[in-house]
Amino acid sequence: MKRAMTIVVVVAVALLASTAVYAWWGGYGPGYGAAYSNVDNMKKFQKETLSLRDELMTKRIELQNEYGKSTPDSSRIVTLKKEIIDLQAKIQDVAAGYNIPAGGYMGDMPGRGWGRGMYSYPGCGCRL
């Protein structure tokens, strides 16, 4: 009886440990571009939104620089945030036209896939 109970406990601990290691090491997820069914649409989308994405990155850097100042200008910060939101909305509208899911269109932004845990994003961990 004691031996059977020990075997059950060892098997349960091994199963629990293996699932924890699998989750830590990285399980399957949607990954980059998993939702894209049409490569041509994605290429067209990227070409069409190149200038918008460049402008978005510039605004983000300007916002970062404004926050980095010793006395940040709050009105400038509000203006930059609004401009960033407007650019994101424009990009999302174009993405919807090409049937690209929201949030999955930015090539420079990480997406779920191989990662360490449920909320892990490789790289900076930032989202739109």
Image (cartoon, rainbow, N blue to C red):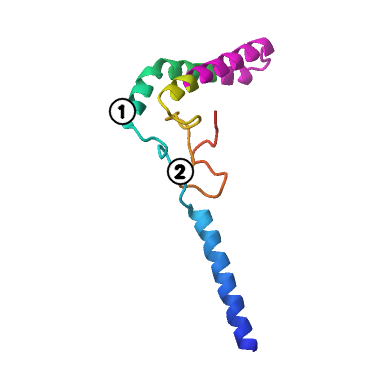
Q: Amino acid at mark 1?
A: Asp
Q: Quadrant of the C terminus?
A: top right
- Percent from the top left, x then y, of residue 80? 59, 14
Is 119 contained in the magenta span?
A: no
- Percent from the top left, x then y, of residue 7? 58, 81
Which stretch is magenta?
Answer: 62-91
76 sits left or right of 62 in the view: right
Q: Residue at x 54, y 37 (%)?
A: 125
Q: Residue at x 52, y 60 (%)?
A: 21
- Percent from the top left, x then y, of residue 109? 47, 32
Which of the pair 45/10 is nearer the observer? Answer: 45
- Percent from the top left, x then y, of residue 101? 47, 31
Q: Quadrant of residue 50?
A: top left
Is 78 contained in the magenta span?
A: yes
Q: Residue at x 34, y 26 (%)?
A: 41
Q: Which numbered circle lies on residue 40?
A: 1
Q: Which residue is mark 2?
A: 30
Q: Helix, strand or loop at disc 1?
A: helix
Count of numbered tags:
2
Q: Main secondary structure of the magenta part?
A: helix
